[in-house]
Image (cartoon, rainbow, N blue to C red):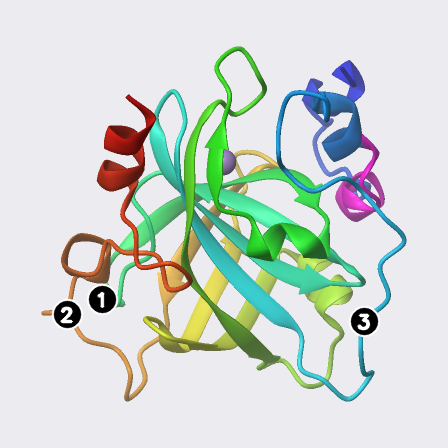
Amino acid sequence: MDFAVLKPLGPGSRTVLKRQKGLASYQNRRDFTRTTEPQVRNEKRKKASEKPIFVIQQHAARSMHYDVRLEIDGVLVSWAVPKGPSTNPRDKRLAVLTENHPLAYADFEGVIPEGEYGAGEVIVWDRGSYDNLKEQKSMAECFDDGTIEVFLHGEKLEGGYALVRMKTGEKNWLLIKMADDYADARRNPVKSEPESVVSGVTIKELKKSKK
Ligand code: MN
């Protein structure tokens, strides 16, 4: 257990990205003899020309949330979004920064056993590639600035999304649908499209099959 990552950062700290680099905290929090989550391996991207990936995993942990993960510099930088993403630009969804995950995590679906970190069911709710809409800046710079704007090419989510760090704390961000042609206030994919884009199963079905 890496307790250092749980300590709050001082005001005005610019060390977030540095702290977020690497996967030590991911590795330290998990017992890989118990969980089937992927271990940290030396991952190489297939082609440099390939677009970076994103994944959104629905996670029925102690409280239900959606883990939004963006590939940045070889890891999945991750936020836990309790209410999940919205397609309505008026919704500002709290997104709490969590530890980086390895790229292989984008394929993970299953049940994290009781007693383990993050115990509960996980499905791949959406995934695809993304474009950095701030062409002048790298994603790492955008992260450090606390303003990320990406265009998601998912199966459920399409279009621009912003992630904005709040002044109230280094870990608290907001996930907001940008006002573009893909915005849709009437859609509510979190409710209407609960199934995994990989296996088609829902969290409910996973819970049932466990019993
Ligand atoms: Mn989670």
Q: Which residue is mark 1?
A: 88
For residue 76, say whether it is visible.
no
For residue 101, say whether it is visible.
yes
Amino acid type of the residue that numbered disc 2 sits on in the rendered structure: Ala
Where is residue 48 shown, x and y percent of the image?
82, 83
Q: Which residue is mark 2?
A: 185
Q: Which residues are magenta?
A: 16-24
With respect to residue 18, does 4 lie above or below? above
Q: Is residue 88 left or right of residue 175?
A: left
Secondary structure that dominates the magenta span: helix
Q: Which residue is mark 3?
A: 45
- Name the quadrant of the C terminus: top left
The Cα–Cα distance between marks 2 and 1, rounded to whole angstroms, is 4 Å
Tell me the residue at 82%/41% (across/down). Answer: 15
Where is residue 125 shown, x and y percent of the image?
38, 56
- As drawn, the residue found furthest toward the top would be 115
Where is residue 120 shown, x and y percent of the image?
42, 27
For the residue pair 39 and 87, the one nearer the viewer reads as 39
Tell me the residue at 63%/80% (across/down). Answer: 134
At numbered mark 2, what does the secondary structure look like: helix, strand or loop? loop
With respect to residue 172, does 211 lie above or below? above
The Cα–Cα distance between marks 1 and 3, rounded to whole angstroms, is 33 Å
The Cα–Cα distance between marks 3 and 2, rounded to whole angstroms, is 36 Å
Tell me the residue at 85%/48% (across/down). Answer: 41
- As drawn, the residue found furthest toward the right would be 42
Whether residues under marks 2 and 1 lie with C-beta atoms below 8 angstroms apart, the answer is yes
- Name the quadrant of the N terminus: top right
Using a 10 Å C-alpha cutoff, classify the residue at mark 2 as few (fewer than 14 neighbours), some (14 to 19) or many (20 or more). Answer: few
Where is residue 121 shown, x and y percent of the image?
40, 33
At numbered mark 3, what does the secondary structure look like: helix, strand or loop? loop
Whether residues under marks 3 and 2 lie with C-beta atoms below 8 angstroms apart, the answer is no
